Image: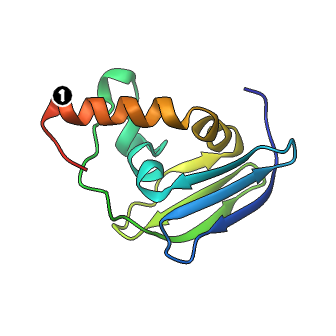
Amino acid sequence: MSEQWPTELRVSSDKRCLTVSFENGDHFELPAEMLRVLSPSAEVQGHSPEQRKLISGKRNVEIMKVEPVGNYAIRIVFDDMHDTGIFSWTYLAELGAEQQEKWANYLSELEAAGASR
């Protein structure tokens, strides 16, 4: 996926959704829970696919703040104090474009692990 540039980033008033619009016209509403459990941080993703961790129990997580990281990404601070994920514009566009598939995979992994949202 090529680099996309955002034209708008907005946290919903209930702090449970990040809306991202891109200059190519793409517009995504990304739930805070999904952003948290699919965080690109090493804490979640590990340093290889085998090290990736399944994060559960984040159904009610909220976005406390969004901070710019250079001109290529944002850091999202969640109310569970997770703040180490750097969400590039490309990753946010990928999450939006593949939201249904990624969420379905996450729910399947939860079920297989006997864990809950």
Residue on which the image places disc 1: 112
Locate residue 91, reporting x and y percent: 62, 39
Q: Residues within 10 Å of mark 1 (few under 14, many from 20)?
A: few
Residue at image point 65% right, 59% down: 19
Task: Specify the amino acid type for callout 1.
Answer: Ala
| 61 left or right, relative to 66 | left
* Quadrant for the N terminus in the image: top right
Residue at image point 57% right, 58% down: 75
| Count of residue discs | 1
Residue at image point 28% right, 29% down: 108
Comparing 64 with 84, the one in front is 64
Locate residue 60, reporting x and y percent: 33, 65
**For residue 98, what is the image quadrant?**
top right
Locate residue 106, reporting x and y percent: 35, 35
| 116 left or right, relative to 88 | left
The outermost residue toward the bottom is 13
